[in-house]
Image (cartoon, rainbow, N blue to C red):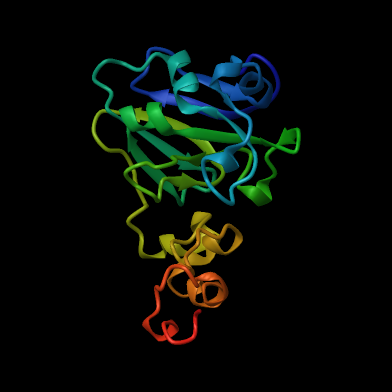
Amino acid sequence: MATNGKSILSVEGTVQKKRGWSYEDLSRLPKEHQVEDVSRLVAGMEGAGVRVKAVLKESNPLSKTDHVTFHSLDGKFAASVPLQEAIEKGILIYKRDGGPLPDSKGGPIRLIVPHGDNACSNVKSVIRIELTVGKGKDTTWDPDHDNPAIHGHSHDHGHDHGHDHDHDHGHDHDHHDHGHDHGHDHHDHDHGHSH
């Protein structure tokens, strides 16, 4: 089990070595596996994490393994992700403001899969990682998965309010082009009085 401190995550299933991970264990993983600021990958998400591949590598998945299932603490939520996608993109957020990720933010561990095939692979309070042959338990199809209280995020456009992606550009130009378009003649109605 964990070599230091209380285990907050277990890895089991089709692996050569089951093991538990404590906060300290995750912190000691090599720097190249640490993600210091997850907000650079997922807007609006805060904290620091470690790449899923670093955790899985320690358990040495069996060659037939093709899926990784992330189980929440309460057992109500799980996401089963193809092994390759989990290795390439998965991140386990476990740290915030220099300490453990609080439960109120989805701690002690929260899974995100930036740019993954399934945008719903965002599980709060991950307690167990299970490697499987074939898809494991997956609740991301649940009709309530848009509910932020259950799922941790919503698919509506609420996320975008904090980081303008120029989604107003369709009508923004009308506000500021009139005064300095004299040389461009974009607007037919300016011909008579632009000069």
Residue 95 image position (x, y, % from top left): 67, 34
Rendered position, 144 above or below 171 = above
The N terminus lies in which quarter of the figure?
A: top right
Q: Quadrant of residue 185?
A: bottom left
Is 120 on the left or on the right of 152, as rendered? Answer: left
Residue 109 image position (x, y, % from top left): 58, 37
Which is nearer the eye, 138 or 95? 95
Could one spot residue 1 in this view of the protein? no
Q: Residue most toward the front? A: 195
Residue 63 image position (x, y, % from top left): 26, 15
Which is nearer the eye, 185 or 114? 185
Could one spot residue 166 in this view of the protein? yes
**Residue at x 42%, y 24% (from the top left corner):** 12
Which is nearer the eye, 37 or 10? 37
Residue 189 image position (x, y, % from top left): 41, 86
Q: Across the whole image, how many numbered discs are drawn on residues?
A: 0
**Residue at x 23%, y 20% (from the top left corner):** 64
Rendered position, 27 above or below 141 = above
Which is nearer the eye, 6 or 57? 57
Is 25 on the left or on the right of 193, as rendered? Answer: right
Rendered position, 7 above or below 109 = above
**Residue at x 39%, y 26% (from the top left corner):** 87
